[in-house]
Image (spheres, grey):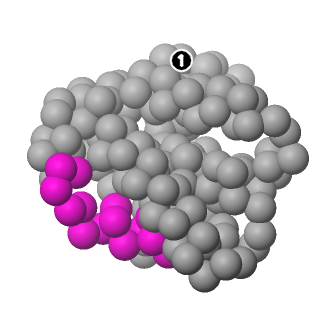
Amino acid sequence: MNLRENFRGLLSKRGLSLFLATGCFIGYIPPCPGTYGALQGVLLYWLLKSFPIGFQFTIALGLTLIGIWSVEFIVKDSLRRDPDEVIIDEITGSYIACIGKESLWALMLSIAVFRIIDIFKPFPLKKVEKLRGGWGVMLDDIIAGITTNFLVYLLIKAWGS
C-alpha cells in the first residue's frame, strides 16, 4: 500500500474508530495499555485544567460519545467484548477522575485510585461492564472516574491539603 491508500484507510469509519478507540494506537503498546490510556487521560486533563469547569465537562461528554461510537466498530470487528487495545474508556474515566483537581498530588492520587477501581471493578462496575458494545466498555470506566473523583475529593478534604 502506498501512503495515499494508508491515509484513506485511516479516514474510513473503521480506521478512524480504531485510531480513536486505541488512543492514537497507544493501546497496542504492551504490557499495560489500560495504564497508558489512564495516563493519556490525565495528560489531557493537565493540558486543559485551566479552562472553565463547564468546558472540562464538555470534553468529558465528547470523549464519552467518541468512545461509545468508536468502540462499537472495534467490538463488532474483533468479536471480543472489551479488547485490550481499546483504551478510550480509560482515557475518559481518568479524565473524569481528574476534573476539578489542581495539584500534582491530587492528580497522582486520582490516577492511582482510578486504576485500582478499574482493575478490581467493585459492584456495580462488574455488572455494568457486561452491557454489550460501546456502552459496556465505556460505562464502567465512567462510573469508576466519577467514583474516583468523589473519593479523592473526600481524601483531600480529610487531609486538609
Q: Is residue 111 magenta?
A: yes
Q: Is residue 4 left or right of residue 129?
A: right
The image position of residue 104, as x and y in percent, is 75, 73
Residue type, label 1: Ser
The image position of residue 69, as x and y in percent, is 42, 22
Q: How many marks?
A: 1
Q: Name the image quarter holding the C terminus.
A: bottom right
Q: Is residue 83 left or right of residue 52?
A: left
SS label for mark 1? loop
Q: Name the image quarter holding the N terminus.
A: top right
Q: Image point 55% across, 28% down: which residue?
A: 61
Q: Residues within 10 Å of mark 1 (few under 14, many from 20)?
A: few
Q: Image point 69% across, 51% down: which residue?
A: 100
- Magenta stretch, overall SS: helix
Task: Tell me, yes or no, if residue 64 can be seen here.
Answer: yes
The image position of residue 152, as x and y in percent, is 53, 66
Q: Is residue 9 above or below residue 109?
A: above
Q: Is residue 107 above or below residue 133?
A: below
Q: What span is colored magenta in the figure? A: 108-125
In the picture of the structure, the residue carrying the numbered disc 1 is 12
Q: Is residue 25 left or right of residue 141?
A: right
Q: Image point 32% across, 30% down: which residue?
A: 134
Q: Quadrant of residue 114?
A: bottom left
Q: Quadrant of residue 52?
A: top right
Q: Image point 61% across, 20% down: which residue?
A: 11
Task: Tell me, yes or no, if residue 27 can be seen here.
Answer: no
